[in-house]
Amino acid sequence: MQLHQLATWTAAAALCAGCVTHPPGPVVPPPLEQQVRYYGGSPLSGPRAGASLDPSAEMLTLRGAAWYLAGAPAGFEPLVSETRLILRDDVASPLRASSELTAGARVTQGAVAARWLKALAAADDTVRSPLGDVSAVLLAGTTTEWLLGPPGLPAGEPRITLLLTPAAGGTVEAALQVASGGDTEVLLAHDNIAPADNPVLLWVNSPFASAQPGSLVATIEIGTTGTGATADWQKERSRAERMVRAASKRALDMKGQVDAKTLADAEIRRAIAGLTEPGQLRPCLVFLAHAGDAQLALDVAMIADEAVLERFAALIDPKVPAGDLGWHLESQVYRLYARALADREVHDAFDAVLLWHAGEVGRTSGAIEDVIRASTDLESLRRNLVAENTFALGGGNPGARVRAYDWLLRHDAAPEGFDPLGSARERRQALAAAGAAAAGPPNPDGRR
């Protein structure tokens, strides 16, 4: 995370040097509780139905602590300046042009943060009150929620949540969510956190009712366990996996109700109309892709430049039925990239995005077009991607086999016992066995 560094320690020490006004006596925070929860998905997608975990994926760790401060910090960079999107929990108007609930949030990292943390630890109880430590794991494809709120974390009450999702290169995507007064705001950090940034310190004005108004500071340290994860970390990983499965089941059970609430035709129309409004193109595309569970479209909306987004938006049918939104967006963005591939206009970064979402299919325009023509909705698209990547396992190109196999493995569809770099005979045997298993046992007449 590339955050602005401050010039001197004088400003960093201001809080603990008495530059923040507070009444005499110990700091008395409001009653607060911390929890750690997990779900499969991202801060934008929320819990996803059918989310799965890769048991072999590297596990990152989070060590954190929270403090209540008598006042607000001064002299640090506002978090909003390090933010790529400010979202609100409102399907009709998901974008905020400026921060409201999170306006006072600030952040720093590394050496400056370490000095701040040391000063906090040395300060007396008239300056800060510790709220406790947390430990959590960070697993690929999941989001770790660090929640802080009134005891029991009742629905509808103010709440602060830090959302952390593992990303490429051992880094972590971060988002801050603040809920207060019936409103919710989410800030998505522009840059990822890496272990080299440790520690990261985040300040937020307290949204909690208290006789002594103040702010909260969270300290964040990202680590790795490598091959030597302790029993405590393995126990936490098991807890995380159980919570991910439970959240996935709840999302599956509620999918029909969620669709009915979030994909209302009038809301889709408003978001599509917003595509032509100044400054609204990216956030409206993000909202539409999120609402339709169109995963490639969501990534494109998040990372593509304005020229690509304009081409994408021009392909969207303003009259698309709400129930068909996800498939419409996904098919159009695949077609957009098939044309770009044919014209050799795809940047390396988007090669990686296509590889992630489509496997070996995403390498050629013809394969993408064939799959889209053969599909009629998101479910048939997934089936066809599985079929085409499985077909690629039988090819003679080892790189293609590896790409296809890695994609199938992530989607729990890899043939058992198949090694993309094994001998031709071993590969044929594994594919034949997988095909026989998929066909099921033969009928009494010998037919399957």
Image: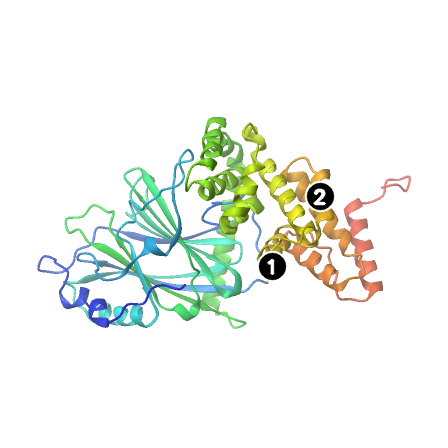
- Image quarter of the C terminus: top right
Q: Residue 60's x, y, as percent?
A: 48, 64
- Mark number displayed over residue 366: none
Relative placement, left or right, of 203 versus 2 is left
Q: Secondary structure at mark 2?
A: helix
Answer whether residue 293 is visible to the viewer in this image: no
- Mark number displayed over residue 348: 1
Q: Which residue, given by chain and number where applicable, does mark 2 sit on?
A: 369
Mark 2, residues whose alpha carbon is within 10 Å: few (<14), some, or many (≥20)? some
Mark 1 and mark 2: Cα distance apart in space: 20 Å
Q: Secondary structure at mark 1?
A: helix
The residue at the point 67 percent across, 47 percent down is 338
The residue at the point 86 percent across, 40 percent down is 443
The amino acid pointed to by label 1 is Asp
Of residue 179 and residue 374, the one placed in the foreground of this image is 374
- Image quarter of the N terminus: bottom left
Q: Residue furthest left?
A: 24
Q: Residue 158's x, y, as percent?
A: 29, 44
The amino acid pointed to by label 2 is Glu
Q: Residue 356's x, y, as percent?
A: 61, 54
